[in-house]
Structure formats: C-alpha cells, structure tokens
Amino acid sequence: MRNFLTLFYKAVRLVYNIFRFKANYCFTWFLFLFNGVKFQNFETKGIPYVMIARGGKCSIGSDLKMNNYLLGNPIGRPQACVFFVDNHAVLEIGTNLGISSAAIIAHLHISIGDNVKLGGGVCIYDTDFHSLDKANRIDPLLDKKFTKRLPVVINNNAFIGAHSTILKGVTIGENSIIGACSVVTKSVPPNEVWGGNPAKFIKKLS
C-alpha cells in the first residue's frame, strides 16, 4: 500500500510540474518581452523577478537555463532569480548561462560571457548602492549622486560558487572558479581558483 501511494504521489507531482513549468515559461516569456529584454530560447523552473528601468538595456543569449526558488536546485537560500537594470544601465548575458536563485543588479554595466555557471544565491553588484560618506547618505539626492559604480565582467566558462558575491569593478577571468560563499572585491585572472572573504588566490587550473 505504501509503495502504491508513493508511486501515485510521484505521478501526480510529475503531471503537476509539467503544467506548472509550461505556465512558468509563458509568464517569464511575457516578463522578458514587456521589459524590453532581447532574448532567445530559454528554460525556466519558477518565475524570475525582472525589472528593466527606463533607458536600461538587457540582452540574453540563447540556451538560458534558470532555477527559481526551490524548483530544480534546492540547495538553500531560495529566491527568484533577479534581473535588475537601472536607468540607462546595461546588462549583457551570453549564451548557455546556468543560473539558480541568483541576483544580478546592474546600475552601470554588467557583462556575462558564454557558458557561465552562477551557483545558488550568487549576487553580482556593480554598485555600492549608497555613498560611503555618512554626510551624503543623509540626503537621498547626494547619496545617489556620490554612490560609486564600476562595471563588472564575468568572462567565458567562469563558475561562481553558491552564495558568492561579486562586487563592483571586478573582472572574473576566462575559465576561473570562485569558491562557495566568497566575497570577490578584486579582479581574478583567467584559469585560477579563488575563494574566501575577501576572495584570495587558491591555485592555478591546469
């Protein structure tokens, strides 16, 4: 009896997920379209958060594979993937991006190459969000005016481990790997493994 109930549950869940994932795809397709995102084919489990502000530009290459919330990649800290592009900022994503519950926040310019993997909960920020001067933070206009922003570049074949944060001005070299839960504050050369808080060199890749 227990085996029957288990098989019945799995069959119902399978049918439910088929319909749910088709609905997720359709809703995400409209989100991209109405936000002016240039996109091609994609797969999604769950629905991302997409916000492209006035004057912002976002382009996504083919074969995007995306997990949102617990769907498809239940490794902790689940949320929707976030694609946020501020006024007149640019977000460029290449082909075959794999992304799970990650947040990409572009206030200036973020570029992600081909065959990049962003582990669960990864955050990429090209801004400090607020001025570092306490006097400026009191005034919202000055706070915004004096907030530092620098471009971020993630090159081809990079792998960013789960729950890592990439900060403004950072370039991740081609093929490089960032260990889980790292905070990357400076650029990483190609073909290297870095990790920690702040992230430091660990070894060369052969």
Image: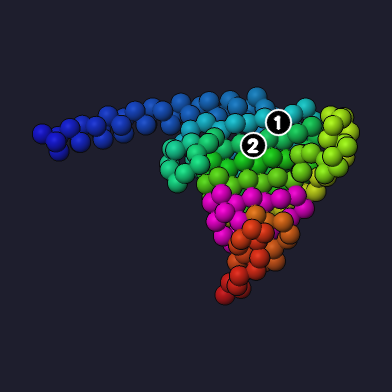
Mark 2, residues whose alpha carbon is within 10 Å: few (<14), some, or many (≥20)? some
Element at badge 2? strand
Residue at the disc numbered 1:
52
Q: What numbered label is drawn on residue 83?
A: 2
Left or right of 26 in this view: 133:
right
Left or right of 192 in this view: 78:
left
**Residue 189 occupies which quadrant of the picture?**
bottom right
- Mark 2–mark 1 Cα distance, whole angstroms, equals 8 Å
Q: Quadrant of the N terminus?
A: top left
Residue in the picture at 61% in, 70% down:
202
Whichever of callouts 2 and 1 sits on the residue coming sooner in the sequence is 1
Residue 118, visible in the rendered structure? no
Residue in the picture at 34% in, 28% down:
16
Specify start and end residues of the magenta stretch as a single range. Answer: 162-182
Left or right of 84 in this view: 69:
left
The image position of residue 206, as x and y in percent, is 57, 75
